[in-house]
């Protein structure tokens, strides 16, 4: 019996060490999958979590957001100010998503995405989604103070509700992106997809809307 207790007592520090090592390793892996500027998930881990979220059987919504006139912020105030705006946007989006049982990510540049619950009866879900989007715009469009100066933040949001028979995240992101661009062409704000969303209307290049930054097309996206 004493030999057993001695062996166990000797093994405990080793087990504790491995446990601490595993915890640190998980933290490093987790940190590597997050955007260093905002702390949000980067594209791949965001999409992984978003796909899981869409399989939970509840009414969900997919959002794509883009900052308006972000280039002008960089040109006028400098890239450090642009980074401050991106950081604040990411932090605000993370809090909003957490408040609405969702997940958020930075897709790249000044482009963000999220998936949240949309609760309520069938005839109230649209109002619920509209309220969520208005809350999102209110939070994201607060000025960001940099070097003692307030910088205006303006956002375009596209949102689409999810039904079980349309659980293709890529298609939902494409459709939300298309509606975001509709809002952007109108000067900002939000555009919500119809109750029964159709397929995206714009041409797809490399899985993204034609004209989007990063797509190899002859045309360019002219609305910043």
Image: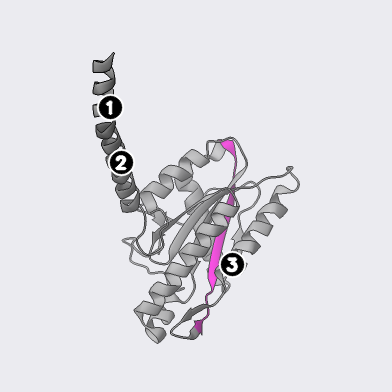
Which mark is first along the chain, 2 or 3? Answer: 2
Residue 201 shows up from this direction: no
Estimate the spatial distance between the alpha carbons at disc 3 and disc 1, rounded to whole Å. 53 Å
Which residue is at 55% across, 68% downward? 140
168 or 45, which is in the foreground?
Answer: 45
Q: Give the residue at mark 2.
A: 20
Quadrant (top left, top right, bottom left, bottom right) of the C terminus = bottom left
**Label 3–label 1 contact, CB within 8 A:** no
Which mark is first along the chain, 1 or 2? Answer: 1
Magenta residue check for 21 = no
**Label 2–label 1 contact, CB within 8 A:** no
> Which of the two discs, 2 and 1, sits closer to the camera?
1
Residue 94 shows up from this direction: yes
Where residue 107 appears, x then y in whole percent? Answer: 40, 58
Q: What secondary structure is found at the residue carrying circle 1?
A: helix
Quadrant (top left, top right, bottom left, bottom right) of the N terminus = top left
Q: What secondary structure is found at the residue carrying circle 3?
A: helix
> Which of the two discs, 3 and 1, sits closer to the camera?
1
Residue farthest to the front, as pictured: 2
Tag of residue 139: 3
Above or below, comparing residue 146 to residue 218 in the picture: below
Estimate the spatial distance between the alpha carbons at disc 2 and disc 1, rounded to whole Å. 17 Å
Which mark is first along the chain, 1 or 3? Answer: 1
Neighbours of disc 3 within 10 Å: few (<14), some (14-19), many (20+): some
Where residue 42 appears, x then y in whole percent? Answer: 38, 54
Tag of residue 9: 1
Q: Is residue 121 left or right of residue 52?
A: right
Which residue is at 60% across, 40% downward? 163
- Span of residues in magenta: 150-164
């Amino acid at each position: 019996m004493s030999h057993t207790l001695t062996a166990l007592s000797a093994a405990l520090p080793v087990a504790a060490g491995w446990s601490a090592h595993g915890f640190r390793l998980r933290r490093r892996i987790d940190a590597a999958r997050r955007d260093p500027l905002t702390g949000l998930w980067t594209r791949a881990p965001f999409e992984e979590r978003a796909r899981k979220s869409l399989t939970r059987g509840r009414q969900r919504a997919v959002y794509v957001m883009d900052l308006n006139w972000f280039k002008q912020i960089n040109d006028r105030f400098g890239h450090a100010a642009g980074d401050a705006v991106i950081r604040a946007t990411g932090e605000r989006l993370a809090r909003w998503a957490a408040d609405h049982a969702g997940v958020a990510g930075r897709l790249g540049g000044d482009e963000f995405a999220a998936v949240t619950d949309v609760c309520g009866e069938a005839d109230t879900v649209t109002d619920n989604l509209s309220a969520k989007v208005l809350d999102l715009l209110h939070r994201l469009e607060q000025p960001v103070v940099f070097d003692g100066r307030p910088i205006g933040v303006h956002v375009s949001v596209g949102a689409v509700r999810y039904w079980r028979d349309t659980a293709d995240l890529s298609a939902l992101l494409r459709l939300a992106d298309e509606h975001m661009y509709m809002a952007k062409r109108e000067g900002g704000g939000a555009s919500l997809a119809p109750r029964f969303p159709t397929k995206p209307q714009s041409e797809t290049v490399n899985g993204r809307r034609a004209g989007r930054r990063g797509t190899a097309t002859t045309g360019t996206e002219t609305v910043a």
